[in-house]
Image (cartoon, helix red, strand yellow):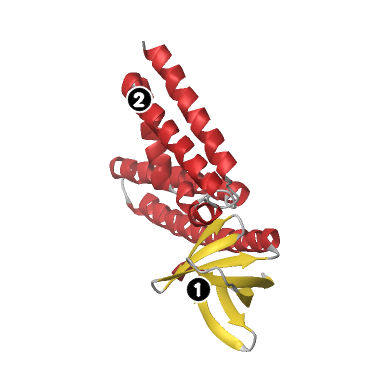
């Protein structure tokens, strides 16, 4: 939380406007000099990390925010989101515990089995959410927020399962993805504006190129194993 010096520019513009960011109590307020540009709850806006700051989407508009104290802002933003999510998780866990206690007091032994199954499910989801929170706190400045979601966990788990069942198909898919990443990394390397728009967090074109090579090699290795 605190005040941070920044500059704003619309996507495609090259001339920035000096601004001040105020991050406090789950809200982000932006002002330029004596003019207050706006204030939004963090839950109502999207902040996608870029190498120099964030791409902010609010009320159907998008702007680029470049921040001088970027590391301090990212840490404050991550801590604020972590505290709010932790509070929601504690509330959900508390409610689940109360519901489970009510079921245990009123249901028979036979009817109690589904309740216990639900309790195990709640514990498993809470454990998954906690793990995703820790990963977001550690790697959130490098990757988009959608990476740290249950949906992405399910997709990755399904991909690993498909890799075991259909290694040849997955190998071909990885080869294609690796080639696309290498091409995109090369293009982004020659166009800083494109890199600023599309690369999340502190990701650089070099990271994309290395990731493409790694995915390509993984696809080759899996193809060799499958054959």
Does 80 appear above or below 173? below
Residue pictured at 65% horizontal, 85% vertical: 33
CA distance separating discs 1 and 2: 44 Å
Disc number lying in front (1 or 2): 2
Residue 159: x and y in percent read: 37, 32
Residue pictured at 61% horizontal, 65% vertical: 66
Occupied quadrant, residue 163: top left
Q: Can residue 118 be seen here?
A: yes
Occupied quadrant, residue 171: top left
Secondary structure at badge 1 equals strand
Residue 92: x and y in percent read: 46, 58
In screen coordinates, is 74 left or right of 152? right
Residue pictured at 44% horizontal, 19% vertical: 220
Residue 139: x and y in percent read: 59, 47
Q: Are marks 1 and 2 in contact (CB under 8 Å)?
A: no
Does 37 appear above or below 204? below
Other residues around mark 2 within 10 Å, as few (<14) / some (14–19) / many (≥20): some
Q: Which mark is residue 172?
A: 2
Q: Quadrant of the N terminus?
A: bottom right
Residue pictured at 58% horizontal, 46% vertical: 204
Q: Can residue 26 be seen here?
A: no
Q: Which mark is residue 41?
A: 1
Secondary structure at badge 2 equals helix
Q: Quadrant of the C terminus?
A: top left
Does 25 appear above or below 73? below
Q: Farthest left residue?
A: 111
N-terminal-most mark, 1 or 2: 1
Q: Farthest bottom residue?
A: 34
């Amino acid at each position: 939380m605190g005040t941070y010096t920044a500059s704003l520019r619309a996507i495609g513009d090259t001339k920035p406007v000096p601004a001040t960011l105020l991050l406090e109590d789950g809200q982000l307020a932006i002002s330029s000099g004596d003019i207050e540009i706006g204030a939004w709850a963090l839950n109502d806006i999207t902040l996608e990390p870029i190498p120099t700051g964030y791409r902010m989407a609010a009320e159907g508009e998008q702007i680029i925010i470049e921040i001088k104290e970027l590391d301090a802002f990212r840490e404050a933003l991550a801590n604020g989101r972590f505290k709010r999510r932790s509070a929601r998780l504690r509330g959900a866990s508390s409610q689940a515990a109360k519901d489970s206690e009510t079921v245990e007091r009123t249901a028979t032994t036979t009817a109690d089995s589904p309740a216990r199954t639900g309790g195990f499910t709640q514990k498993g989801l809470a454990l998954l959410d906690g793990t995703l929170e820790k990963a977001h706190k550690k790697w959130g400045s490098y990757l988009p927020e959608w990476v740290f979601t249950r949906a992405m966990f399910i997709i990755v788990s399904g991909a690993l399962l498909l890799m075991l069942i259909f290694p040849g198909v997955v190998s071909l898919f990885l080869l294609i993805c690796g080639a696309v990443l290498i091409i995109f990394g090369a293009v982004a390397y020659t166009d800083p504006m494109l890199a600023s728009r599309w690369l999340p967090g502190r990701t650089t074109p070099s990271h994309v190129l290395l990731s493409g090579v790694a995915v390509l090699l993984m696809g080759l290795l899996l193809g060799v194993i499958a054959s």
